[in-house]
Image: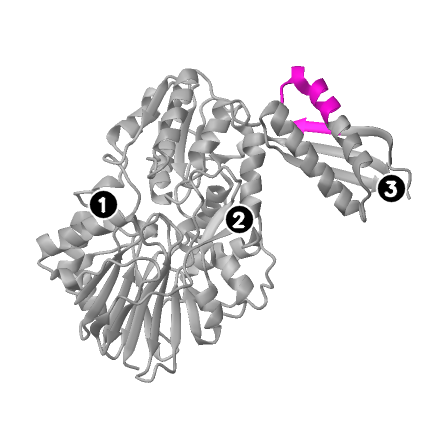
Amino acid sequence: MNHINIFALGGLDENGKNCYIFETFDEKGENKKIYVINSGAKVPINSSNKIDTLIPNFNYLIKNKDAIQGVFVTDVKNDSFSALPWLLMKMPTVPVYTSKFNKVLIMERLSKYKLDLKKVKINILDRPTKVGDIFVNPIELAGSMPGHIGLDFITPSGDYLFMFNFVEANLGIYGNLDFDEMPKKFFAKRKIKALIVDSGNSNQNCRAADKIVLPRNVREAFFSAKPDQRIIVGAYDEEMYSISQILDFAYEAKRPVIAYGKTYGQVLSLIKSVVPDLKLPKVLDYKYANKVKNAVILVTGTVERLHSRFARITDNNDVYLKLQESDTVIMIAPAINGLESLEAVVLDDIARVSPKVMELNNFEFFHHHPAREDLAKLINILKPEYVIPVQGLYRYLQDAQRYIVKNVGFNSKNVLLLQNGQVAHFDNGKLGSYKRKIKEVGDVIVDGFGVGDINTEVLNEREVLGREGVVLVAIKYNPIKKKIVGKVQINTVGVISKEEKSDANDLIKATLLNVIEGKKFESLREFQNVCRQAIRKRIFKVFSKEPIVVVSAVSTQ
């Protein structure tokens, strides 16, 4: 084994959908072994087509499924593992490797899908383990949730280290990471050939550990609020370390907590079972959100959906939680790129009901990702020969490259900026080329539990439905007498105003009669299609709308 390929099926020049491939093979291009690192998803930020999720294109893996040695999950954030169910639907017997904590959450997530869990094999990776022809060593990281690990792929030509979603700090049950100890502890006798590292936060000129501790004014809010006033906290459910600080404040202020988010509630229960002596405030059921006057209500959700959840609350569409003027609202969830406008609208709507609103921005507080100074220190200590920045928008990966070259003294040719599908090829540890591309990359649309089952035509129809509306026509038709039997049922949505509805119904009925009198039809399907086209043309001429028209005709013969 002398050759190694590293490339991404997702996660480069985008937020989310992280999926990286570590591939080994011999001089003849044979004996290929594929190691999949993470299988993440992302939710479209601005989707008018009701698309649930985007996942990586797994066609390359399906085509080479016999070569796959395993899927390695570093953490259980949505952008790291949420596409795993669909990958296992295609290849249910592929082994999965992860930490003990992650395994529990992965199994819980997989149980929601149509998977034969007896075939799924999830291995706990807690020591150097031989997988295929090489050893894989898990490295404990400090992150926003327990169980974060880095992955060191140990090869004869050197080590290839993958590190995502971490900070350098001692976070207790959320992990302990000290860069200075890593060489002696993990790489005393080996050379790191390439460091594949999370760089999406490289525009922040600081240490990440300094920005994951909540500011003092957040704690003060717990004691300045009156005993009969609620405190409502908005947070991303994956940022558990940040939420744990809220739990500490609630415990100190002797306030009960209501976890108003299913995912965080489940994880909190898991943590309590793993660490039974953990000091926690009294936790109440979410149905008491409007009944307990001094409660701390944790409104949690994914990065893409938290602000939409608050929008539902401010619109009084939430069953159990209504905002009150006396509430103190604390948002510890800075919006990601693309959601800033929604965040601004939601905060304004909250302030109209509850004037005491406190928000943290990206300069005061951010997610558990290494910042610029962390990257520089890590590279200076580990001294890898190559660095590949990953997990983020291209401009931030480019910013990481510039900073590493300028401040760490790296050769710019040794800091590789890749796009999804672009292959970095190493020959006996030396970079050979990174111009070749894998064709099978891109977004795959998931709608509900189905995957890849929405084509362009379906998406176009959804856009038309939202923009032009729909006309539904149901009739009984006698093909022999060429007559409509009984009443014509007509429903319109989003097409015309109430005042014009009667005229539109008369127009549709007249169009149907013209079609029936005009020609004979070989089948009921042909009759329905001709009616549909004729109705759509007439509506466009009269009302300047092009709705979706559905004609349901039942033959009486």
Which of labels 2 and 3 is toward the front? 3
Tag 2: residue type? Thr
Q: How many marks?
A: 3
Residue 85 visible within the image: yes
Residues at marks 2 and 1, CA–CA distance in whole angstroms: 42 Å
**Segment colored magenta:** 490-507
Residues at marks 3 and 1, CA–CA distance in whole angstroms: 74 Å
| Between 382 and 311, the one nearer to me in the picture | 311
| Residue behind mark 2 | 456
Q: Where in the figure is residue 321, as x and y percent of width and height?
A: 52, 26
Quadrant hosting residue 178 = bottom left
Mark with earlier residue (2, 3): 2
Q: Secondary structure at mark 1?
A: helix
| Residue behind mark 1 | 208
Tag 3: residue type? Pro
| Between 202 and 359, the one nearer to me in the picture | 202
Mark with earlier residue (3, 1): 1
Q: Is residue 499 magenta?
A: yes
Which of labels 3 and 1 is toward the front? 3
| Residue behind mark 3 | 479
Q: Would you call the spot at circle 1 few (<14 residues within 10 Å), some (14-19), or many (20 or more)?
A: many
Q: Secondary structure at mark 2?
A: helix
- Image quarter where the C terminus lies is top right
Q: Where in the figure is residue 199, as x and y percent of width and height?
A: 25, 52
Instruction: Tell me what residue is drawn at x 36 percent, y 29 percent.
Output: 341
Quadrant hosting residue 254 = top left
Left or right of 398 on screen, residue 544? right
Which of labels 2 and 1 is toward the front? 2
Left or right of 384 on screen, residue 146? right
Left or right of 279 on screen, residue 477? right
